[in-house]
């Protein structure tokens, strides 16, 4: 498919002008469990009328495109096809879910190196094209790979961010809703920091429809706050491990998270979501990507939201940032 329209440069030579961004188009790079589940969720969302799928295995991308397309009679009209990097230049959102999964006996650092290497083949392809849209990183470890994407894609930081702890936060809200017998959509709380073992719940600013969390807990007959909150935070952190142990992969929850982030972008909702972005001195943290609540709209990240954190929480957030910096030092030249 053409990547632009012909025009003439100052020297008279014919050049290709990049297409303007198509707000109804999304691209998915990587068609594994997460990529295909996310593509399916986006097909059902009605947000887009065109979706291009890319994968190192072209047959895999073609198969997923065909499989999802066959459900279109039950959804809204949409063009879904397998393509190349030339097909992504005008996509409003380019989602990158490509990456290897951790194998038995493989360390986390081994996995990080492997996926940084994979991104080393993807990002130059994006950098050499006049991409107009937003780059959404979903592959894990998402914070490290978001950092790599920001450095290698050539796009502004505001247009390159990761899914971060959007899913972890959804898990937190779900578990709090179950604990308190209340609609989880009325729970306002965040998991921040690394999307991983050093993540933390920001309990200081958690509330249920404006009512401080501890007060609402007591209203519902729960009084052992510290014990209950610690248990719930551990459940959130270990959720992925539990799911992987039972079914070997997680993909539906993150697929719904991807859909939610895309909604905020395409509809310019200016929603506050805990996505992974670069820190520039906030809470004393510099030069690392991690998750903090941010206003997300059609131009990507507009600004971070300075939520209230206690001193112990700030210390834990800094420790999470230091953990990520340690990994970056190991894998980045």
Image: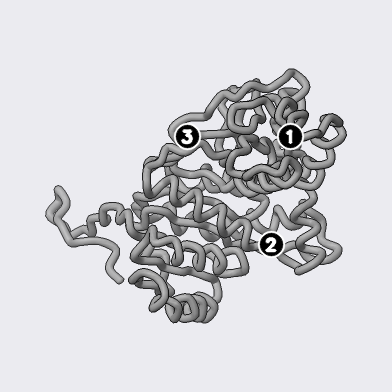
Q: Nearer the viewer, residue 132 or 151?
A: 132
Numbered tag placed on residue 320 in the rendering:
1
Task: Indicate which label's residue lies in the foreground, 1 or 2.
Answer: 2
Please name the residue that numbered disc 2 is placed on.
250
Say which label, 2 or 3, has the lower sequence index.
Answer: 2
At label 3, counting other C-alpha atoms closer than 10 Å, the crowd grade (few under 14, some 14-19, many 20 or more) is some
Q: Nearer the viewer, residue 172 or 52?
A: 172
Of the 4 image quadrants, the one containing the C terminus is top right
Element at label 2: loop
Question: Gap in Å between the C-alphas at discs 1 and 2?
Answer: 23 Å
Element at label 1: helix
As drawn, the residue found furthest toward the top would be: 311
Please name the residue that numbered disc 3 is placed on.
295
The quadrant holding residue 324 is top right
The quadrant holding residue 226 is top right
Lateral position of residue 178 relative to residue 285, left or right: right
The quadrant holding residue 330 is top right
User: Image height check: is 58 above or below 268?
Assistant: below
Element at label 3: strand
């Amino acid at each position: 498919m053409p990547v632009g329209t012909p025009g003439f440069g100052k020297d008279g030579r014919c050049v290709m002008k990049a297409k303007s961004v198509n707000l109804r188009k999304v691209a998915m790079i990587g068609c594994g469990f997460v990529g295909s589940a996310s593509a399916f969720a986006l097909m059902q969302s009605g947000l887009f009328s065109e979706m291009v799928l890319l994968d190192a295995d072209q047959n895999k991308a073609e198969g997923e495109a065909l499989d999802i397309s066959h459900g279109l009679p039950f959804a809204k009209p949409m063009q879904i096809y397998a393509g190349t990097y030339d097909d992504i230049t005008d996509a409003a959102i380019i989602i990158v879910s490509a990456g290897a999964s951790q194998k038995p006996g493989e360390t986390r650092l081994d996995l990080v190196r492997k996926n940084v290497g994979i991104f080393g083949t993807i990002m130059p392809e994006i950098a050499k094209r006049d991409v107009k849209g937003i780059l959404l990183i979903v592959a894990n470890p998402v914070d490290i790979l978001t950092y790599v994407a920001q450095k290698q894609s050539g796009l502004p930081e505001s247009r390159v961010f990761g899914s971060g702890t959007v899913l972890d936060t959804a898990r937190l809200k779900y578990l709090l809703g179950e604990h308190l017998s209340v609609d989880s959509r009325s729970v306002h709380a965040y998991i921040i920091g690394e999307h991983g073992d050093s993540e933390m719940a920001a309990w200081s600013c958690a509330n249920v429809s404006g009512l401080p969390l501890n007060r609402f807990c007591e209203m519902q007959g729960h009084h052992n706050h510290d014990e209950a909150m610690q248990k719930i935070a551990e459940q959130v952190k270990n959720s992925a491990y539990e799911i992987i142990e039972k079914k070997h992969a997680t993909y539906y929850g993150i697929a719904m998270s991807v859909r939610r982030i895309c909604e905020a972008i395409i509809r310019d909702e200016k929603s506050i979501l805990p996505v992974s972005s670069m820190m520039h001195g906030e809470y004393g943290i510099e030069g690392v990507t991690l998750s903090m609540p941010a206003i997300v709209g059609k131009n990507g990240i507009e600004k971070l939201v300075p939520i209230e954190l206690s001193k112990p929480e700030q210390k834990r957030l800094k420790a999470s940032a230091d953990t990520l910096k340690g990994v970056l030092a190991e894998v980045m030249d």
